[in-house]
Amino acid sequence: MSGTEKPRGPLAGLRVIEIAGIGPGPFCAMMLSDMGAEVIRIDRASLPDQGIDIPVLSNVTNRGRSSVVLDLKSPEGAAALKRLAVRADVLIEGFRPGVMERLGLGPEELLAINPRLVYGRITGWGQDGPLAKAAGHDLNYIALSGMLHAIGPADRPLPPLNLIGDYGGGAMYLAFGIVCALLERNRSGQGQVVDAAMVDGAASLGAALYGLLDAGLWHDRRAGNLLDGGVPWYDTYETGDGKHVAIGPLEPRFYDTMLDLLGLTDATLRDRSEANWPHLRAAFAEAFRKRTRDEWCALLEGTDVCFAPVLSMTEAPHHPQMAARGTFVEVGGVVQPAPAPRFSRSRPAIQSPPPSPGEHTREMLAAWGLSAEEVSRLLG
């Protein structure tokens, strides 16, 4: 690709309408935009108070699209959205069930004017069921899925950020569902509704664990299993400078390599039976406290110990592996993760910094087919 050629992601040519929201909706729209889709974000003139005030450029999940302000509660705003929907491939919304229908902008109305539209809906509980219209957040949805119960020390579950519900079980499943529906549209010529619920996605992420539970290979309690910090050789340890490292030599040969490199020659440490776990954990904790995190990196990084330093978010972009792959980029002065995944021919890229609400209203309404007179009426 030449220095002047614009990056072209695998979704180039796709037109997406995002009805502004928080959490998984913007993250899904970011994913589609990073992959080359043209995303137009429909903002409100005044956004609801979310308890935090994020500077525009720091609102990373809003990157890569244009912003148009429309009052969807007004007849003019609703009519303008319908005009946009005629030209769109995808619409994303994240309201509680029934909100878009009350605005006259639900799937029935929009698919009637654009039968090829893929209408993506993201909620916590789903579009139906006894909790469908109840308020909630990521933590509540993963609690109901069984996943929160499995995360944390033995005495209580711990919130794992909002990665499992909002983004993993929500946004990524919505993006996957949208792309699946687009592929199906190539065969049928018809759009459809994608009902992505964070509670469904979070449960789906736990598929392998539910299989292990059924097989009797997973204890339905925290910190008692192979991958939840139960075993001493899949955990984090404090180093001599108060930082931490992560080890995960699950395979016996990797485990033996770790013992050798740590200089642990006691034959009792080769016994990995559950009764010996307290002894192993104490030995590992004592060993890792003898050196700083950087000293352990010098000794163990790149070996088959399955080792990594526990880096802060400030440190992570500067690690040699991250730098070599360009895992982080700087856009508008803000360091942020680059688009993922990578492709052999396509070139995903961040198309633009996050926009201010309404920054592109006039130009995008015109570009998507509204006349100058219609745009003037909308803008007063």
Image (tube, rainbow, N blue to C red):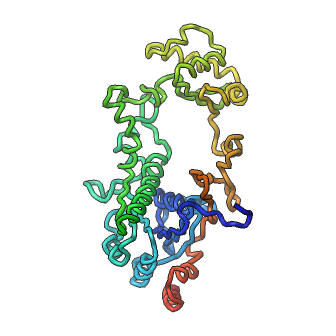
Q: Quadrant of residue 260?
A: top right
Residue at (36%, 27%) from the top-left corner? 219
Q: Is residue 290 above or below residue 79?
A: above
* Residue positioned most to the front: 187
Percent coordinates x, y for residue 178 in the rendering: 42, 60
**In the rendered image, which quarter contains the N terminus?**
bottom right
Residue 241 seen: no
Q: Is residue 172 left or right of residue 255?
A: left
Residue at (63%, 64%) from the top-left corner? 353
Q: Is residue 138 above or below residue 312?
A: below
Q: Nearer the viewer, residue 163 or 255?
A: 255
Q: Nearer the viewer, residue 61 or 107?
A: 107
Percent coordinates x, y for residue 11 in the rendering: 53, 63
Percent coordinates x, y for residue 320 in the rendering: 71, 40
Percent coordinates x, y for residue 153 in the rendering: 46, 30
* Residue positioned most to the bottom: 373
Q: Is residue 68 left or right of residue 332?
A: left
Residue at (69%, 56%) from the top-left corner? 330
Q: Is residue 166 above or below residue 252?
A: below
Q: Is residue 350 left or right of residue 233?
A: right
Q: Quadrant of residue 74?
A: bottom left
Q: Is residue 140 above or below residue 5?
A: above
Residue 168 seen: yes
